[in-house]
Image (cartoon, coloured by chain):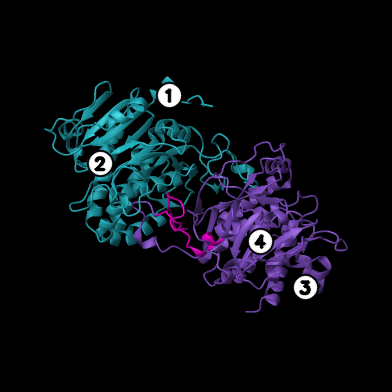
Chain colours: A cyan, B purple
């Protein structure tokens, strides 16, 4: 029995698809059945004089570095054009309530029955139902069809919290890079809330969020010289988002939907193993474990500015990069405010 | 391809199966292929003059209320004989490193391929590999075969923590009680660590643990008059176990293996909804969210005695039952010490 989609045309109109890229978007052909009716925001990495080809029939706007500099002026320096962290500009310029962002090396995955997965359908299911950050439900997301709270789950907590983030997962493409040391090909049919107080490694590969609830925290940072692109930025943004969601009582879900990712994630992680990031970890993770926001910080912007202050105070000694990052965080919030006047 | 079992005869000899019951153990017939080589500890609930029949061929010892009173003397009052909380005595009297406890209305479940699930094989996989309580791995238990850490997972935390508890799940038996309002029939192929700082509702239905690491915290309490049997005790013990594991740096896993449970869990929960427990929740859950142990509390026994003190101080005003429970907790630790001299 095919279940009717929960995505009505009016819901669809409330979401923008943000794609960071440096190349022609041939990968969209595979996504056509699922993305053809959505509006796309493409943010071009690298050389702005290069022309990016977008397959016919898609409704899109495209920004390159020159466009961003024109729109943001001196604040444009907070946007990285070296890698997929450029996606942050797409979040800022969107006028929609929901954002879905995806990498240009991702493809439509199949569920175990062989059916193509409609990633947006699943992300909407995650975002439109509450989360359970306060008390762990061992039966996974209790708000999904056919699911429930486990016996003994406190009744007082069953209303849940608003869901801000849906962190989708990736499978290694079966015909993809065979050099991946340990490709992930396990499809787990689950969605769950990452509990309050627990940090995680978020991925921008297949990510959806409620811009109204958490948008200003979705800053992928500026990429450091010599840093392997697209690794540390993702960990960083996930940590920022999570501590702010925890403070504001918002939920972060992870699990379904899956996409196929052609990159060899673990090989990349192995490269990374010897780099700066490993020594940073020992300072950065405890920093986020201990971060506390003042009670008065009641908006994402306020929390983010407070976080930028603490980053400068407590992490600059680890590496001067963090002082620069802190300045970029402040610039980002300023630019966000200009484009998103409330 | 059939994977070889990780359960060697010498590993099997390190585990006791604890079964609380008030009736003949016909259900063991279904478990024979999986439990025939294990030692069973049966703890009889209710009238000690009744004879419990155990199918031929099982290696077991059986204790009823009279036996427990003879062994524990005045401390026997900490063991409840009204319901399955009696299992705690089995934990105490066992001389093994690992315990598996199961309810007498549980049956062998099948995985999606139709194969009977060897619950102990899966529990051993959970207990013999580390947990990840400090940082959430979105790809579930990274130590299971075919699994890994997600890209970006901090290298500093990949060693994990010793696993103390494996909380297996239950499926509603397809031919079981059809009155269950929302039977759980979703098999999710996952195991995960419940993060540090997050509370959950543990179940004694299908539970394994490392007695050396966490045994003295596995006290299912004394059942209050008029309290629906087997509900609040489970929630209570899970909260105690979790805060102590968090303090001591131990891991708690949940997920596989599944068993079939013939009881209608959700119907029971609905009965419970109007009862005392709901008003308790509002005091009890925050109590556990805020409990802090002194640094000097470095053993499970020390933590448990400290917890009993705080229960008396902070929860007695909610209901005098908690003062009695606190006394029983102290008695339990005393009895544990007598039977488990180190």
Secondary structure of the residue carrying tag 1 is: helix
Q: Which residue in the protein does label 3 denote?
A: B72
Identify the mark at residue B35; answer none if there is no mark. Answer: 4
Measure the alpha-carbon separation of dots 4 and 2. 54 Å
Tell me the residue at 51%/52% (across/down). Answer: B191
Measure the alpha-carbon separation of dots 1 and 2. 27 Å
Identify the mark at residue A122; answer none if there is no mark. Answer: none
Q: Which residue in the protein does label 2 denote?
A: A84
Measure the alpha-carbon separation of dots 2 and 3. 66 Å
Q: Decide if residue B314 is in sight here.
A: no
Q: Chain of mark 4?
A: B
Residue at the right extreme, as displayed: B49
Q: Is there a contact, CB below 8 Å, between mark 1 and mark 4?
A: no
Question: Neighbour class for label 2 at 10 Å: few (<14), some, many (≥20)?
Answer: many
Q: Which residue in the protein does label 1 denote?
A: A11
Judge by depth and name the residue closer to the eye, B220 or A292: B220
On whether disc 2 and disc 3 are found on a single subunit, the reply is: no
Range of residues picked out in magenta? B124-148
Q: Please name which of the two marks, 1 or 4, marks the residue nearer to the observer.
A: 4
Picture coordinates of residue A212, whole percent (x, y): 39, 33
Secondary structure of the residue carrying tag 4 is: helix
Q: Chain of mark 1?
A: A
């Amino acid at each position: 029995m095919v279940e009717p989609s929960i995505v009505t045309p009016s819901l669809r109109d409330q979401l923008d698809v943000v794609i960071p890229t440096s190349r022609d978007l041939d990968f969209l052909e595979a996504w056509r059945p699922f993305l053809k009716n959505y509006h796309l925001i493409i943010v071009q990495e690298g050389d702005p004089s290069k022309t990016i080809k977008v397959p016919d029939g898609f409704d899109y706007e495209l920004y390159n570095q020159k466009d961003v500099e024109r729109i943001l002026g001196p604040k444009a320096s907070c946007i990285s054009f070296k890698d997929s962290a450029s996606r942050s500009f797409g979040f800022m310029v969107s006028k929609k309530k929901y954002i879905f962002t995806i990498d240009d090396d991702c493809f439509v995955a199949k569920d175990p029955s062989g059916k193509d997965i409609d990633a947006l359908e699943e992300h909407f299911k995650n975002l439109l139902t509450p989360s359970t950050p306060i008390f762990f439900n061992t039966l996974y997301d209790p708000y999904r069809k056919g699911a429930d709270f486990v016996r003994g789950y406190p009744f007082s907590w069953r209303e849940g919290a608003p869901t801000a983030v849906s962190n989708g997962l990736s499978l290694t493409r079966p015909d993809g890079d065979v050099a991946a040391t340990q490709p992930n090909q396990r499809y787990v049919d689950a969605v769950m809330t990452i509990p309050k107080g627990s940090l995680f490694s978020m991925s921008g590969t297949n990510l959806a969020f409620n811009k109204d609830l958490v948008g200003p925290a979705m800053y992928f940072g500026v990429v450091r010289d010599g840093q392997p692109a697209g690794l540390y930025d993702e960990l960083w943004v996930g940590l920022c988002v999570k501590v702010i969601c925890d403070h504001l009582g918002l939920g972060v879900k992870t699990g379904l939907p899956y996409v196929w990712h052609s990159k060899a994630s673990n090989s990349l992680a192995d490269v990374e193993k010897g780099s700066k990031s490993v020594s940073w970890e020992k300072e950065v993770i405890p920093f986020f474990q201990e971060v506390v926001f003042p009670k008065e910080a009641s908006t994402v912007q306020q929390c983010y500015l407070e976080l930028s202050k603490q980053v400068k105070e407590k992490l600059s000694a680890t590496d001067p990069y963090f002082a620069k990052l802190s300045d970029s965080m402040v610039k980002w919030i300023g630019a966000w405010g200009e484009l998103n006047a409330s």
